[in-house]
Amino acid sequence: MRAEEIALVAVLCRSRAGLKVAADKTYLIESRLQPVARREGFDSIPKLLSEVRERRAERLIWAVVEAMCSSESSFFRDRTPFKQFEGEMLPQLAKLRGGGPVRVWSAACATGQEVYSLAMLAEEMSATEGSPRIELAASDLSRLALERAQTGLYNQFEVQRGLPIRRLAQHFEKDGDNWRLSEAVRQRVRWRRINLIAGLRQVGRFDVVFCRYVLGHMTEEAQRKVLEDLTFIVPDDGYLVLGLHEAAGLVTPAFQPIVGRPGLFRRNPAFVAAAA
Amino acid sequence: MRTCLVVDDSRVIRKVARRILEDIGYEIAEAADGMEALAWCRAAMPDAVLLDWNMPVMNGIEFLRRLREEPGGDSPVVVFCTVENDMAHIREALDAGADEYIMKPFDGDIIAAKLAEAGL
């Protein structure tokens, strides 16, 4: 790829999704855009990008940006946030909501492993009488990732990353060479396409927002905007969950890290977001 | 140091598994079938067993059932590591007392993660 082609991709990603694209990671860019070029009927990435440059078709621009956004995911990634959700956040919030649902949002859910990990926990808890009501929502910018996530279909490698074998046996069925998550678990999740930098104030209230390993890929300006917008979503007694030791939470005082709970944040009561 | 007994009739697999497990801090013993593995366990019970299914002399599931009946045989964490990747085998392994289950092919991340799932 030539420098101006990389620059074009970088500008589109930054302006549309707040995404940082490192110009030296040519290999990454090519591996992400190759499938887009093929799918859209171009014989090369340069041909795809020259079409983007000349015609500026929105659909093609988004295909490029969404491909650059897609990221890795695994079941029960880092383990602790899920233990903390199950053992601390959920019981506490369930009590505070007094029988009302505890609403959880997996923002930038990629292929769905994070929200489905929560959905498996919810399904397992639902067997116990008086267990809290949990509403799960998941979003991503990438339509392809969302489509894949909704199938609940994972390959053998993916189901062995973070998923205990008992949960595989409990919630999945073999489907050809792949594994399919049960209907009961899949139906617990509501899906939406959301661009995190497009303004989140209409998204609604969520008691817990998982937004892990996303902000670090964004420009600092975009990180700040997303975090400050999240103050309209997470209530004072709610939680924001970032990646373990993810420094992104510190670009704005909107949220404060909880001491001794790496990755967990609370609203800063003293912070007032600027008017929209 | 934690010990792990690697049970597989393939010398290549044993070697690959040994390298991965040594890297994450295990001391390794090797056995080529279930009978040899049982002799190892009677002499010195390991902390973990990485266990193939299909082997000559005594297969993995038979070894596991016998191990769980041995004195102290309920203590090792047993992780199957096999090409058998259907639900019937997985359930059979869990019923026989396996703690975790790896479907081949595997890599270092999977082994480390599965041992962690099993509490090691």
Image (cartoon, coloured by chain):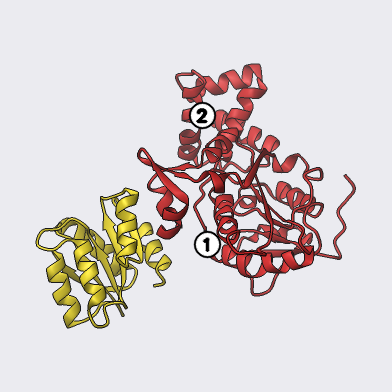
Chain colours: A red, B yellow
Q: Is residue B110 above or below residue B29?
A: above
Tag shown at residue B47: none
- What residue appears at the point 86 percent right and 54 percent down from the top-left corner? A273
The residue under label 1 is which amino acid type? Asp
Which residue extends farthest front? A129
Q: In this view, does A116 lie above or below A49?
A: below
Name the residue carrying label 1. Answer: A78
- What residue appears at the point 30 percent right and 75 percent down from the top-left corner? B76
SS under mark 2:
loop
Give x and y (percent) for residue B38. Answer: 16, 73
**Image marks 2 and 1: residues in contact by CB distance under 8 Å:** no
Depth check, front residue: A78 or A226 = A78
Depth check, front residue: B90 or A148 = B90
Depth check, front residue: A91 or B26 = A91
Q: Which of marks 2 and 1 is in front?
A: 1
Give x and y (percent) for residue B14. Answer: 19, 61
Measured in 3D between alpha carbons, the distance from the residue under mark 2 to the one under mark 1, in whole angstroms, is: 38 Å
Toward which corner of the image does residue A170 lie, by quadrant? bottom left
SS under mark 1:
loop
Q: Quadrant of the N terminus of chain B?
A: bottom left
Question: Dot 1 falls on which chain?
Answer: A
Toward which corner of the image does residue B75 lie, by quadrant? bottom left
Question: Dot 2 falls on which chain?
Answer: A
Depth check, front residue: A49 or A147 = A147
The residue under label 2 is which amino acid type? Arg
Which residue extends farthest right? A275
Q: Is residue A133 visible?
A: yes
Give x and y (percent) for residue A235. Answer: 80, 59
Give x and y (percent) for residue A155. Answer: 40, 43
Name the residue carrying label 2. Answer: A2
